[in-house]
Image (spheres, helix red, strand yellow):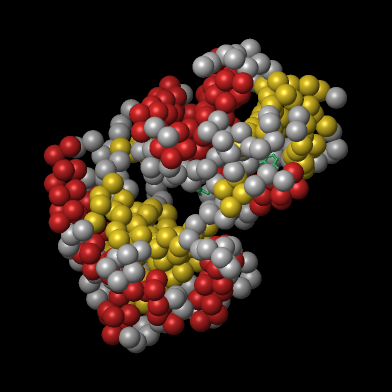
Amino acid sequence: MKFYDVIIVGAGPAGLFAANELSSKSDMKILVIDWGPDVKERICPALNVSFCKKCNPCKIICGVGGAGTLSSGLLNLHPQVGGDLEELTGSERVAWELVNEVDSIFVKYGAPNTVYGGDQGAIEELSRRAAAAGIKFIPIRQRHIGSDLAPRVIQNFKNDLERKGVRFLLKHRVEKFDKGKVVLDDGTVLEAKYLIIAPGRSGARWLLEQARRLGIASRPGPIDVGVRVEVPAIVMEPVIKVAFDPKFHIYTETYDDFVRTFCVNYRGFVVQEVYGKDAVGVNGHTLQAEKSENANFALLVRIELTEPLEDTTAYGFSIMRQTTTLGGGRPLIQRLGDLKRGRRSTWARIERSIVKPTLRHVTPGDIAMALPHRIVTDILEGLEKLDSVIPGVASSSTLLYAPEVKFYANRIEVDKNLETSIGGIFVAGDGAGLSRGLVTAAATGILAARGILRKEGLIS
Ligand SMILES: Cc1cc2nc3c(=O)[nH]c(=O)nc-3n(C[C@H](O)[C@H](O)[C@H](O)COP(=O)(O)OP(=O)(O)OC[C@H]3O[C@@H](n4cnc5c(N)ncnc54)[C@H](O)[C@@H]3O)c2cc1C
């Protein structure tokens, strides 16, 4: 049986940054385990970029670097985007320090120097216009690593960790963990004084099962339900000049619900996502080689449930299945003008729109028949408000695709060091419901590592 000081499960940003913090500040024996492959095996030899959704049928891209890092690698440099580091740390100052630290480490390993969203004059002007419309514009600096550069950044990071003594065990799944040990898929048992479990979204269900088995408390996270909005690229251009991926937060008039824009794809494409045989949804992406005439973004309503149904995932799936049934197995598409008039869209009506849909594997229909009334009201009111900041976004020919649903992992209960109720077992990242993005996931890895360093008396 092999013994380590710390075993980290998951080589995503949470796991890598935890390993970095520990190996920089101690001489502990550290092992990182991931069921996915090494960086170079994640690169498509034809395109020299990480395997994309087109050729990666499992759609969850795992291995060294984790999910998403090799995909587009957009670093959102704000402690309240992609999670809430202020809530986790209890300090605005510490939260910002973590963001800057994560950013500087990515730059150290080769992320580009360019930061988007730094034009203070333009940000103030857009914030003012948004505030006048009752909208909060979240000015965030963003660094775009890009799919061509990301593998090199992650490879440099891993090489340096190995130089500092960190070991990697790849293509091995951790089946089970208990206080002080993990059991691999081939039955091997590895022991460690501390565990950091950071399995990301692909391992969230597994982590939840393990937590339940061990009696570690958890609670369901929220979900975001809404539509993908598609407009002519020219409509989004003025805000794109201010922010690479502009984020607006809105509270709606009727229900006072939280609605936000997410994942803006300028000159991008709407894509279908399959969640099972009876549930499809939509998403958006941009391609380097091909540009569209449109821009798309998600407009999402935050939903949190209390008893008797706290399981937001079950609710999200029921909405998704209902929409899929109405669409005959495809996502629905509707012109905003048709939705407002209370009639379904048809292909003939869609063709009259000045926006040509970038996703055609859809069924023209009536989103009001598919999504709950409250969500439709929130979307209509949200778009009306947005229109005064982004003129044209609520035009009749704007296209809406449904459903777009963002699920989050159950939140594992932890203390401020990210240690669970079982001493020595720490969790980090998206799989534990503590983050929803690269920077915040990385920051939670650092926090868990500091929890261990603190217990060892190596930091105060
Ligand atoms: C296509 C895509 C694009 C994205 N783009 C962005 C973006 O541009 N910007 C942004 O901020 N966020 C983006 N994200 C989200 C971002 O990738 C995640 O928030 C982040 O990777 C979470 O980090 P993590 O370390 O918690 O988990 P992950 O990155 O998911 O890493 C977890 C790792 O654990 C491994 N693992 C899981 N279970 C086990 C097990 N039982 N045994 C062994 N190994 C296991 C997995 O193989 C995986 O490599 C994107 C996500 C996707 C899917």
Residue drawn at x 33%, y 80% is 339
In the rendered image, the vertical position of residue 386 relative to residue 416, given as above or below: below
Residue drawn at x 30%, y 31% is 114
User: Residue 101 location in percent, x, y?
Assistant: 42, 25
Count of numbered circles in the view: 0
In the rendered image, the vertical position of residue 9 relative to residue 257, given as above or below: above
Q: Is residue 393 left or right of residue 218?
A: left
Q: Nearer the viewer, residue 191 or 348?
A: 191
Q: Nearer the viewer, residue 113 or 359?
A: 113
Q: Residue furthest bottom?
A: 343
User: Residue 408 location in percent, x, y?
Assistant: 53, 53
For ligand 1, the image quadrant comes to: top right
Residue drawn at x 26%, y 39% is 117
Q: Which quadrant of the rendered structure holds the N terminus?
A: top right
- Is residue 377 in sight in this rendering? yes
User: Residue 136 location in percent, x, y?
Assistant: 25, 52
In the rendered image, the vertical position of residue 211 relative to residue 327, given as above or below: above
Q: Nearer the viewer, residue 385 or 390?
A: 385
Residue drawn at x 37%, y 77% is 334
Q: Nearer the viewer, residue 306 or 174?
A: 306
User: Residue 349 location in percent, x, y?
Assistant: 32, 83
- Is residue 230 in sight in this rendering? no
Q: Is residue 384 left or right of residue 256?
A: left
In the rendered image, the vertical position of residue 88 relative to residue 160, given as above or below: below
Q: Is residue 367 left or right of residue 244?
A: right
